[in-house]
Image (cartoon, helix red, strand yellow):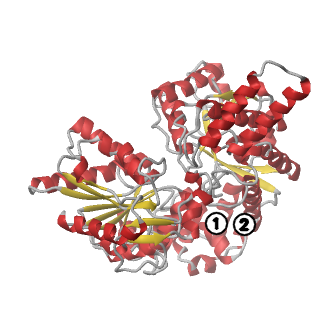
Amino acid sequence: MPPSGAHGPRSVRAAEQRERIRTLVFDEHAALARAVAARIATVIRAANGEGRRAVLGLATGSTPIGVYRELARLHREEGLSFARVETFNLDEYLPMEAASAHSYHRFMWTHLFSQVDIPAAQVHLLDGTVASDDVAAHCAAFEAAIAAAGGIDFQLLGIGKTGHIGFNEPGSGLESRTRRVHLDTVTRRDAASDFFSERNVPREALTMGVATILAAREIAILATGEHKAAIVRRAVEGEVDLGVPATFLQGHDAATFYCDNAAAAALTRIATPWLVDEVHWTPELEVRAVIWLSETTGRGILKLSENDYAEHRLSGLVARRGEAGSVNGGVFRSLNARIRGRALLPHSARVVVFSPHPDDDVISMGGILRKLVQNGNAVTVAYMTSGNIAVFDHDVRRHLDVLQRVARERGFTGGQLQRFADDVLDAMSAKRPGDADGADVADLKRIIRESEAVSGIETLGLAATHARFLDLPFYRTGTIEKAPVGPEDVAIVRALLEAERPHYVFVAGDLSDPHGTHRMCKEAIDSAVAELHPGRPHGPQSPPPEYLEQTGSPWSPEIWLYRGAWQEWPIAEATWLVPLSREELRLKIQAIFKHQSQKDSAPFPGQDDREFWQRVEQRNTGTADLLDRLGLAEYNAIEAYVVD
């Protein structure tokens, strides 16, 4: 799929006045990965055609995994050879054993080097075990090796929350070279989920310097997910700033940002394209523009004047409609029609709710879930992964203690429970932070999460019989990194859909979870639906359930996307806005509280320090507050949904 601009080539060209780094935007994560891999393949073939090795600078993290998988496919299926490729990795934690689950050495051999024909001698990785006194010499030798290879042809980068590239933290100098660095608080906090606690994150690292990176002949910076939107805009459109190292890339002649739609969402040409150039107005864009104007001026939609439009470069919108009142009224009615109370929600239908983890259902759609139950719908909640890696060891010890106390006080005999408990406790004591759990520990953590999930939906009026635990295979690696979604995952999802034949399917459209599980779960659902209904109609215009039942037409569910754990749907994008009363919001929060293993200090908090219930309360009430500011009805809280 080709990259998408904002609203056609004119807008892209005009955006170049604001965008100081070439930026390509892709509709899908997979399309981005294919484009970057294709560019790398071109670089390899061009260098080999000149009779020399191609020199690649490589990065780690969840975003490049798709690129590496595509490169491995190109090698396997299209003959792309790495025999004449030399690589230099961007960074490594210090200290860090090469065999550690967290080492970038292991990451690269797992995801790329072992999948292609690159000679080991042509792989250069910074050594996380180097003695402190030898660090300077090790870094100098790394720089010398890059120079001896003829310099880096293509450098792959990610971008951190603070705008760091590699481990070049804010304040890194333009002339910096490969060196030891101290990791700042934000970087260590962002890495905490990989290490199961911030205290386990190393305080130092080795990294290529800014000057080393800028010396590459071509640079690609990858960014995916809503949580990268703000820093992408800062890096692409902001002034060069020592405090945001990614802005140094503006001075490179061949640097390109590769972003998905979510990461590019804050760019001016996408967020507010009318500030860049003339736009092609669509109903969706009109709604976005009027909401923006209302927020910018501090006036309700129905109070916006022609002067407000003129002063904010929106005169063309008024001219199209004839007067400001027509624009205001049209958008006001459009937003008002999106509000769906309980009476307008499905009744007596079959509903399947897919929850990537065993708490996403109540976190993101606990309010509507309660209403669906009250409306007499047959609801099935399908928990797609066990979520077992997100349970702390101390929770396992607490549950074991309860079992042991019950056994002692009730006089249970046989010693089987005690032997089991001893084995589990010994296994956890011998485990290092980040190591995969043994089978017994992993199973206990799965059971803990399942029991919490049942307790959560019971709070909303469902029973344990309404829960399905799919335990998809892609998640069962025991580590942060997951296997690709495969045919077995899709088959499990498909079997559930065939068994339930739902009229409505709810799917997590929140793609900013720290390790991509939500995105992978959606991939499995999309694949299953595509197998069941090739060419199915999508969106609100799909035939209603009653029509399908009466005509005997092929079953085709309406798919609603929810968010909430990491982001919320903007009002302008939402298909439906579902109001929650104070009591319904309180009940939703109570359901979230049932997930005790995730409360107080969740193992994977992402980039938001607040507990999930606090995020939910702020987002749901915040959506309602925005509607109020726009001049619509005042509600206590609102959940937002997009019909796919």
Q: Is residue 329 above or below residue 530?
A: below
Q: Quick check: can you spot residue 599?
A: yes
| Image marks 1 and 2: residues in contact by CB distance under 8 Å | yes
CA neighbours of label 2 inside 10 A, class few (<14), some (14 to 19), many (20+):
many
Q: Measuring from the top left, give residue 78's x and y in whole percent.
A: 22, 38
Q: Is residue 105 above or below residue 495?
A: below
* SS at badge 2: loop
Q: CA distance from mark 1 to mark 2?
A: 7 Å
Q: Amino acid at mark 2?
A: Leu
Q: Measuring from the top left, give residue 276's x and y in whole percent.
A: 45, 73
Q: Measuring from the top left, give residue 90's x and y in whole percent.
A: 36, 62
Q: How many marks?
A: 2
**What residue did someone put label 2 on?**
630
Q: Amino acid at mark 1?
A: Ile
* SS at badge 1: helix
Q: Is residue 562 left or right of residue 591?
A: left
Q: Quadrant of the C terminus?
A: top right
Q: Is residue 297 left or right of residue 194?
A: right
Q: Is residue 118 left or right of residue 407?
A: left
Q: Is residue 52 left or right of residue 365?
A: left
Q: Measuring from the top left, give residue 34's x and y in whole percent.
A: 34, 47
| The one of 503 and 427 positioned closer to us in this rendering | 427
**What residue did someone put label 1 on?**
291
